Image (tube, grey):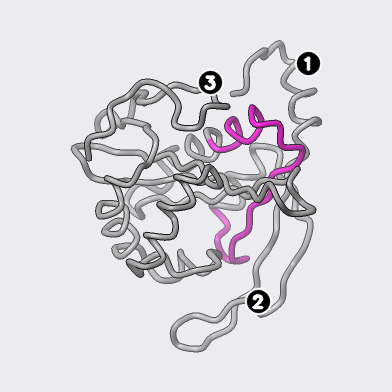
Amino acid sequence: MTNTADTPTNPGSTRLYPRTLPHADGEIALRRMDAADAGAVLAFAQALPTHDLLFLPRDITQPKVMDAWVRAIARGDIDSVLAVRDDKVLGCAAVIRDPHSWSRHVAELRVLVEPALRGSGLGQQLAQEGCALAMEQGHEKVVAQMTVDQRGAIAVFQALGFRPEALLSKHVKDREGRAHDLVVLCQDVAQVEAQMRAYGVTEAF
């Protein structure tokens, strides 16, 4: 993985990468995902518990799905930020948008973190980074979804101003055929920005 540029991949973004995060187990680098990262991200996804992937519309443990992800990044339809230490992917955040849809004002935020680092604050940092990217891109609403039993993830998003908006009953099935409910959480960007201004915060996160 050789992405070392300190300028945004997306020309509309002003957020600079790579950037270093302090962490109890050693510094973690935040940087943009690009085509050279496909193998490392695939290995990261394949090591995750299957249940962690149920909220995704496609199985990212499949190489062809990872290839599609990389192509979407190249088109500018996805911004992906990786959390990396010693060339190992520890987590990622993806901001997905469809500029040609009726919901082009809405971005979807997806966050995945290595199980060993859950509860360490990395998931919140990645979610915060994704929200900041969506905010600077002018999105009016950010949505995230997850299975209802992922209480830790739900708490992370609620701390960032997301609120439950829908429950999709038996919306996904795991590889054993068991059905699971998904909860959809939403963030009103204008409301969050107003709260930030009220607290004297002038830049997104």
Q: Which mark, residue 171? A: 2
Quadrant holding the N terminus = top left
Report the front residue among 101 and 205: 101
The local secondary structure at tag 2 comes to strand
Q: Amino acid at mark 2?
A: His
Q: Amino acid at mark 3?
A: Thr
Q: Look at the numbered discs 1 and 2 and tell me whether their residues touch, using CB distance below 8 Å.
A: no
Q: Give the labeled residue for mark 3.
A: 14
Q: Upstream in the sequence, badge 1 or badge 2?
A: 2
Q: Quadrant of residue 167?
A: bottom right
Residue 99 drawn at (x, y percent): 68, 46
Q: Quadrant of residue 173?
A: bottom right
Q: Is residue 144 left or right of residue 53?
A: right
Distance of label 3 from label 2 (alpha carbons): 37 Å
Neighbours of disc 2 within 10 Å: few (<14), some (14-19), many (20+): some
Residue 162 drawn at (x, y percent): 71, 44
Report the front residue among 4 and 186: 4
- Is residue 118 positioned above or below 168 on the image? above
Quadrant holding the C terminus = top right
Query: In this picture, which residue range is highlighted in magenta?
Result: 130-152
The local secondary structure at tag 3 comes to loop
Q: Give the labeled residue for mark 1.
A: 198
Q: Look at the numbered discs 3 and 1 and tell me whether their residues touch, using CB distance below 8 Å.
A: no
Please tell me how many numbered marks the rendered image carries: 3
The local secondary structure at tag 1 comes to helix
Q: Quadrant of residue 52?
A: bottom left
